[in-house]
Amino acid sequence: MNKEQPSALHEKKGVTQPLNTSDTAINNVKRFRSREVNPDELAEKICNGDTIALSRAITLVESTNPEHSKKANQIITTCLPKANKSVRIGITGVPGAGKSTFIESFGKHLTSLGKKVAVLAVDPSSSISKGSILGDKTRMEDLVKDKNAFIRPSPSGNSLGGVARKTRETIILCEACGFDTIIIETVGVGQSETAVHSMVDFFLLLKISGAGDELQGIKRGIMEMADAIVINKADGDNLKPAERAKVEFKRALHLYPPKANGWIPKVLTASALYDEGVENVWKLIENFRTQTTESGHFNQKRLEQQKFWFLQTIDEQLKSNFYQNPVIKNELKEKIAAIDAMQASPFAAATDLLNLYYNL
Amino acid sequence: MNKEQPSALHEKKGVTQPLNTSDTAINNVKRFRSREVNPDELAEKICNGDTIALSRAITLVESTNPEHSKKANQIITTCLPKANKSVRIGITGVPGAGKSTFIESFGKHLTSLGKKVAVLAVDPSSSISKGSILGDKTRMEDLVKDKNAFIRPSPSGNSLGGVARKTRETIILCEACGFDTIIIETVGVGQSETAVHSMVDFFLLLKISGAGDELQGIKRGIMEMADAIVINKADGDNLKPAERAKVEFKRALHLYPPKANGWIPKVLTASALYDEGVENVWKLIENFRTQTTESGHFNQKRLEQQKFWFLQTIDEQLKSNFYQNPVIKNELKEKIAAIDAMQASPFAAATDLLNLYYNL
């Protein structure tokens, strides 16, 4: 990246920790942390727009402690009737597409219009690499200071299913807290786009123009999911290539069958760094919302998504219960060995194992 | 289709059933059908190349009667050590691509080389439409008369999983019976290609050249699965368009990432109707087999496929057991209603239902 250009990305010098910290301060923090959480009180505060209560509730949602999960469920159930009144926007793009810069510029535009914006992330890799997207809040320096914006990094988790569940529940809490625009960021790794696509109303693919074939390197499934493609960094020398990329993407999008909701995916250019074009993206999303709300598709999609997550959770849990069972774990290895040695057919081996499981 | 051209497709006039049939004949059929099947005897006959025994065993595999399934499993287990010595070829293509003509011409070429060819099909729609592919054996008039060919229509079934299981088990029986080349036909409906792809060594996509964009109308996933694309009906006026299509497909295949086994998918032209080009398809498959056998990928893929079907069967059965449970069936409706009314989150509702299930 050209060092002369303004950038939302900053590297900060490491901060050396002071050698001593006051014991009183430490005890205060510990006391505060161990204080009993009252779910009803927290839910009430959330519904009154208290973002500190919101943060605490999200921490409960993300916790693996069963006691915390119980409280989190109670809060969510109380918050549910206040939720669902928002537009949920998914944003994906390869690293380098300028997602953070775009979200910062887009988010600031929204708060300038009086919107309340929550920015969440789905990044199942974050638990391994610790390199969570949005993890470094300094990447969105202006937005993070905006009192009408709420930024939360990706929950960590071993499975995409777990990360997705936590994010879905966080959406409910943010909506109950009065956030009317939910932005969910994800990176192009594995199945995370599909998960995000299944929890948003509008799915936006962020691209930059590059040398050669513009369509190379995009997973076809992601193109198919997109409600809009925004070609970012359309400024300076990049302007012409971005316009050419726009034409190519438009042509490519024509190859896909029309969407069930009648929406025809659009291609736009923007320069988030110079705050150019983001207002058009928002206008497009507003058009989308109006059009699909009138046709009933907006609400229908949400109902379908809820059912999808319901069934998805059941399926995952059924499998997890089976494969985590110690008797099954042991026998599974032997069955696979028997299959490999042509001593059992896959179907007979599966039937045996299932009979064992249901008679445990 | 030009009526002047020879065709493998024949329409036959309906046959009126005679009004009366001899009671003795009916009783003979009934006695024969009810005769106790001895699984060991049947398995022995199959391993000696008896195709009548093979047909009877496949009927047991396809039966929904639990007694039959038990016998089928016994036969399969006995046959297993004799199986696995074949090449399994999947063939797909839209209706009109000339699959039957191609399989007839290709099959005859193989038997002329001394091969024993079994032709099976996976068509989950056949149970609904009764319009099973390969159902009308007269579509392959010459091949059906060939003593070294065995043709069996698609098993019927309500689920793709069920149809796939039956076909997988039929492959084992055919191999034990001495068939060294297994061809599995499927049509481009839903997920059936994926199922067939997971049970074959080599996956062949049959296409014809058409007006306009050659790539239109192909599901991208199918292109990605193909080890070869054969442009059929490359004869007469079609020759030039077929050559052009070949170039387009070659270019399109380059866009995909290389396969793990190092195989680069090939594009060929053929005219099955005039028996032209099918020998090249077989040469290609032999090359594929030699190359992947030497590298170890051939056998590795089979082991992976067996494991896939093993896990797949478990997953399907776990779900089926849950969703077919009458208590769950009833409660499921109420939970979905609660979710729709925003009274329960999808995750809380799923957790409730799972707790109910595990405490039944």
Image (cartoon, coloured by chain):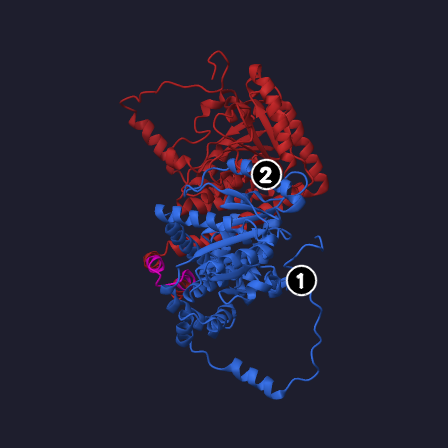
Chain colours: A blue, B red
Is B94 situated above or below A45?
above
Nearer to us of marks 1 and 2 is: 1
- Where is mark 2, residue-wise? B224
> x, y (%) of residue B341?
33, 59
Observer able to see residue B24: yes
Q: Nearer the viewer, residue A178 or B304?
A: A178
Chain containing the residue with disc 1: A
Residue A187 found in image quarter: bottom right
Q: Amino acid at mark 2?
A: Glu
Question: Which disc, if any, is residue B14?
Answer: none
- Where is mark 1, residue-wise? A10
Q: Is A206 left or right of B67, judged from the image as shown? A: right
> x, y (%) of residue A220?
56, 42
Is B302 situated above or below B360?
above
User: Which residue is depicted at the point 52% across and 70% down?
Assistant: A64
In the image, is residue B292 part of the stretch drawn in magenta? no
> x, y (%) of residue B161?
47, 44
In the image, is residue B340 part of the stretch drawn in magenta? yes
| Mark 2 nearby-residue class (10 Å; few <14, some 14–19, many ≥20) | some
Residue at mark 1 to residue at mark 2: CA–CA distance: 41 Å
User: Which residue is depicted at the point 51% across and 36% down?
Assistant: A254
Disc 1 + disc 2, Cβ < 8 Å: no
Helix, strand or loop for disc 1: loop
Which is the main secondary structure of the residues drawn in magenta?
A: helix
Do circles 1 and 2 both sit on a common chain? no
Is B229 situated above or below B42?
above
Find the residue positioned furthest to the top.
Answer: B4
Tell me the magenta residue range: B335-350
